[in-house]
Amino acid sequence: MDKRVFYTSIAADIGKAEPAFPTSTQVALKVMRALDDQDCQIETAAKLVQAEPLLAARVVAMANSAAFNTSGRAITDVRTAVMRLGFRTLHTLAMALVTRQMAGPPTNQANQVLATQLWEHTAHVTSLAHVIARRFTHVDPETALFAGIIHEVAGFYMLSRAKDHPELLDGDFQEWMQTGEAEVGRAVLIGLAVPQPVVEAIETYWSGYLAIPPVTLGDTLLLAEELAPVASPLHKLGGIEPGAGMTARLDITIGKEVLSSILAESAEEVTSLTQALRF
């Protein structure tokens, strides 16, 4: 099987019509569409969230995380959680559910292991991007949160196609890293109507070029990727470690003490956000 040809075919299929995403994502997509309506009310949003128990649980968990619960007062209901988070963060959490369920139900243990590790990686990158945006690169933290959630969406979509084409998981993922990730990813991002600035940031992530000093949303993603304790299995198995050789350069140009300080000061926040994003 020529994987490059198949990746091109996948991207073309997505671009021909409304993307056929797994049925398990439909409730979350409905929430996202409702939130895009300027007339959407808190009560409407809360009812939609409550219709998806997994999303409801994550919304309450996120509202109680260190990043959003600055008062220390725990929330136990969806409506209050939606009010605390706001529609932008709620939209991001709905997208998180879409992304996580994009792979569909696992067809074998190998597929399940890949999907689980890919989501664990996504959760860490998302949490770190949110912190790095606020404390270091000074881009919009909520946009960084959203970008982190979807930066591996192409990988989840590829895993969904692997149930019919298991040969996609054979060997390594070198072809995926070289051409497939960006080609399929662009098509999926367009299908999900992701805003262009976020698409451009993820394009920067795919390129792997981190500007020094990091200042953009794309740089924020790459820095979070480098600092994440769990690597993407779709990169690692390709024989190419993400950010290979980058750590030493970051220590020199940004400063090891600065990076260590960011991680130390935000440890609780990253941990709580990562936990809240574990679907």
Image (cartoon, grey):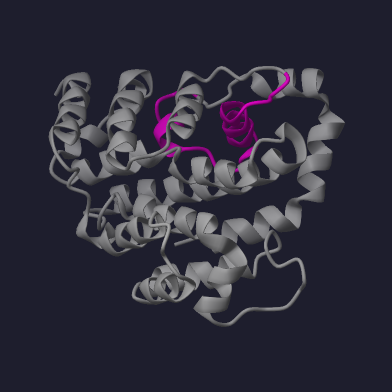
Provide the residue span drawn in magenta. Answer: 213-240
In the rendered view, tell whether residue 1 sits above or below residue 272.
above
Q: Looking at the image, can residue 262 be seen?
A: yes
Q: Looking at the image, can residue 173 be seen?
A: no
User: Where residue 277 sits: x, y (%)?
Assistant: 52, 58
Q: Is residue 157 magenta?
A: no
In the rendered view, tell whether residue 97 sits above or below residue 11.
below
Nearer to the camera, 13 or 239: 13
Nearer to the camera, 124 or 135: 135
Task: Look at the image and tell me in which quarter the C terminus lies.
Answer: bottom left
In the picture as drawn, the residue positioned furthest to the bottom comes out as 76
User: Where residue 124 sits: x, y (%)?
Assistant: 58, 47
Nearer to the camera, 38 or 72: 38
In the rendered view, tell whether residue 256 sits above or below residue 56.
above
Total number of numbered labels?
0
Residue positioned 43% across, 45% down in the render: 118
Residue positioned 56% across, 17% down in the render: 209
Nearer to the camera, 231 or 273: 273
State left or right for residue 99 relative to residue 149. left
Task: Look at the image and tell me in which quarter the N terminus lies.
Answer: top left
User: Where residue 203 sits: x, y (%)?
Assistant: 45, 24
Quadrant housing residue 129: top right
In the picture as drawn, the residue positioned furthest to the front comes out as 39
Quadrant housing residue 173: top left
In the picture as drawn, the residue positioned furthest to the right comes out as 257
Residue positioned 62% across, 26% down in the render: 216
State left or right for residue 266 relative to residue 85. right
Q: Is residue 214 magenta?
A: yes
Residue positioned 52% across, 26% down in the render: 241
User: Where residue 107 sits: x, y (%)?
Assistant: 21, 54
State left or right for residue 146 relative to residue 174. right
